[in-house]
Structures are given as structure tokens and as C-alpha cells.
Amino acid sequence: MKTSGQRLRIATLLLALVPLAALAAANPFARVDEDADGGPRALQLAITSYVPAGQESVTRVDLIAAIHIGDAAYYAELNRRFTDYDSLLYELIAPADSQVPGRIARRPGILSGTQVGMTKLLGLSFQLDEIHYDRANFVHADLTPDELKKSMAERNETLYVYFWRIFFASIDQYAKDPLGIRDLENLSSVFAGHNDWPLKTVLAYEMTDMDAMRSLLGEDAGSAIIGARNQRAIEVLQERLAAGDRHIGIFYGVAHMPDLEAKLTALGFVRADTVWIDAWQLASEP
């Protein structure tokens, strides 16, 4: 059984993954795919397509669920698919006049530093190193740092608020452990070992549990880190549709997907189909 401290350490790791992770009790955007023996094979993320309801149209919008650290093969597959879009809307909290000359430079910060450190710990790659942001069809669709700061202030949100939310969420989840694989006798032994697969599996299952993470993020539509940024993405989407684009992708962290889907539904779109992409290999051997 995990102690409160062990759950808090897992929760702190998830806080670093919040921009990239999405959670839901029955998650339509992230899942752990199992092998023939019922063991965890891969953490998979969804590319979900939406079309206008009740009308013949060539318009299609894809929600492309992202995780910011993943297998190099995962990002290579996304790069291949991204060439098919008239416009690919991406998340990045950056100044409005910033340029993207090739790969985006890593920005200093606690969360970004944690994400980079986790790529080494888990043997994964970092999204900003792998995705080809310099392509002509890429369109920035996120808030600037000043806009995010203002939005958080209006909602009385701070990083301290999120820290305490995740602390109490970890306490609340203490007695809720439906998956035996998450019952670690000692989380520290995972960190001390040389095998990254157990830790990856624990995190993969945690990232498909939305009940826990909703306690952290609050109501998606009302938060700055989710709702306000999603609203900007929808505004850019409407601009691209008005400009004549018909096949548009929205490449955002998987935690953003439920609220983005709700916003698309409000615009008259309905879900058409879903494709699953392996993001992390979880088998005992790569």
C-alpha cells in the first residue's frame, strides 16, 4: 500500500505532466493498450475526428492528443501525419511576436526542467526536440505568457493553488486503487532501479485516471490552464475555417481534449472516428 508521501511523489510527477496528460475514468483520448496476456503493452493517445453535424461537408477537425515526453517513434508518426493538414494548430505559451526557426528552444522553468529530466529517467524523447514546428502549415493557437498570467489572476489561480490541489487529490485517492499494478510497496525502489518500465507503467495508468486529476485542474472550462487556452485555440480554428481551410488539426495536451470536444460540439461538430497512436511502449522489453 502506498503511503501519503508516495502518492504525493506520484502526484508531483503528474503535475509536471499536466500540460501533457489527460485523465478520465472512461477516457476517450488516452488508454493503456494490453497485450494478448492482458499485460500493459503501450500508452496510446487518440486522434479524434469531428465533422459538421447533419450536413455534407469536406470540413474535418482533428483533436490530436499530445503528451510532451514520448517515444521518438510516436513523434515521428505525428510529423508524418501533420503534413496532411491545411493548418495544424499547436499549443505553446509564447509571446505573440515570437518566431519558430526550426526546433523551438527549451525554455527555463521548473516544469519544463522536470519534463526534460523525465525524458532521461524514462528513456523517452522531448516533444519540442522532435516535432517540426517550422512547417508552413503550423499555426500558433495559444495564449501569451502575459495573457495566461492575467487569466490566472482573474480566476485567483496560482501554482501554489495547483500544488495544494494535487496534495489533497493525492490524499483523496489514497483509498482508491482499483488497479493492482499501482500498488507499489515502495515507490523509491522504482527510482533506485535501472529499469524504467515499472515507473512508466505506473504513470501511464495514473494518466488515464481523470477523477484524480480533475481534483487538480478543477472544472476544465473555468480554468486558465485549460479553459482559457482552449478558447484561444477555438478562436484560431474559426479564423482558419473562415480563411478556407477544411482539414484542420488541433495539437494540444491530452488534458485539454474533453473541454475542446465540448467546445467543438457547441459549434455543431460531431465525433466521426478515432485513431490510436502508441506514445509509450510499456512491455517488459522495448
Image (cartoon, rainbow, N blue to C red):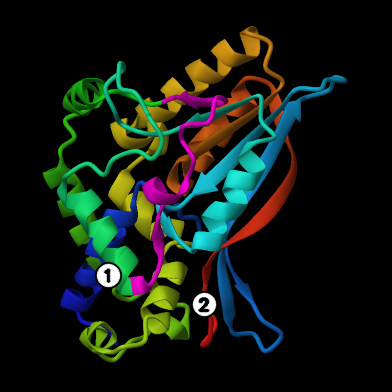
Mark 2 surroundings: few (<14), some (14-19) or many (≥20) residues within 10 A: many
Query: Considering only vertical position in the picture, is 235 above or below 174?
Result: above
Q: Position of residue 1 (x, y in %)?
A: 29, 87
Q: CA distance from mark 2 to mark 1?
A: 18 Å
Of 266 and 124, the residue lying toward us: 124
Left or right of 226 on screen, residue 84:
right
Residue under numbered circle 1:
10
Q: Secondary structure at mark 1?
A: helix
Front tag of 2 and 1: 2
Residue under numbered circle 2:
282
Residue 20 in view of the camera: no
Q: Position of residue 20 (x, y in %)?
A: 40, 50
Left or right of 235 on screen, residue 267:
right
Q: Which one is earlier in the sequence, the residue at label 2 or at label 1? A: 1
Magenta residues, as a range? Answer: 122-141
Query: Considering only vertical position in the picture, is 212 above or below 127?
Result: below
Of 125 and 160, the residue lying toward us: 125
In the orientation shown, which residue stands out farthest toward the left? Answer: 160
- Which residue sits at x=36%, y=33%? 92
- Which residue sits at x=16%, y=75%? 5
Left or right of 139 on screen, residue 142:
left
Of 66 and 156, the residue lying toward us: 66
Residue 279 in view of the camera: yes
- The amino acid at mark 1 is Ile
Mark 1 surroundings: few (<14), some (14-19) or many (≥20) residues within 10 A: some
